[in-house]
Image (cartoon, rainbow, N blue to C red):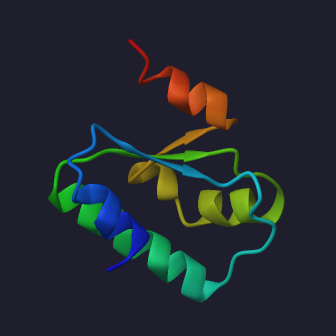
Amino acid sequence: MTAVEAGLATNPRAIVLDMTQVKLADTAGLGTLVSALHLAKERGVPVVLAGASGRPLLLLQRIQIDRHAAIQDSLPSALAGFSA
């Protein structure tokens, strides 16, 4: 079971992926991310990518990941959307 599958088993309102420490991204990582997005979409759970920057952000923009997940500049701004 992946971390995303385990998280989805708890019936969350959303999944926020903290990408602040991601410095490199390859096809394997993107494949895992796309699989996670697909699984979350099947269950009706929105995904937010938080804090991506540099090359990983450029790659996410290039593959137009924002069509499938929201992108926030920071983890606090991503989490703020779910407070209250």
Taking the spot 38% from the left edge, 11% from the top edge, the residue there is: 84
In this picture, residue 10 sits left or right of residue 7: left
The quadrant in which residue 41 appears is bottom left
Taking the spot 43% from the left edge, 49% from the top edge, the residue there is: 69
Camera-nearest residue between 55 and 74:
74
Above or below, 2 against 47 in this view is below
The quadrant in which residue 35 appears is bottom left
Above or below, 57 against 4 in this view is above
Taking the spot 18% from the left edge, 48% from the top edge, the residue there is: 44
* Extreme residue in the top direction: 84
In this picture, residue 47 sits left or right of residue 54: left
Q: Percent from the top left, x then y, of residue 26?
A: 67, 83
Q: Percent from the top left, x then y, of residue 15?
A: 40, 47
Taking the spot 70% from the left edge, 51% from the top edge, the residue there is: 52
Camera-nearest residue between 9 and 41:
9
In this picture, residue 44 sits left or right of residue 77: left
The quarter of the picture where the N terminus appears is bottom left
Q: Percent from the top left, x then y, of residue 36?
A: 37, 68
* Extreme residue in the left direction: 43
In this picture, residue 65 sits left or right of residue 45: right
Number of numbered discs present?
0
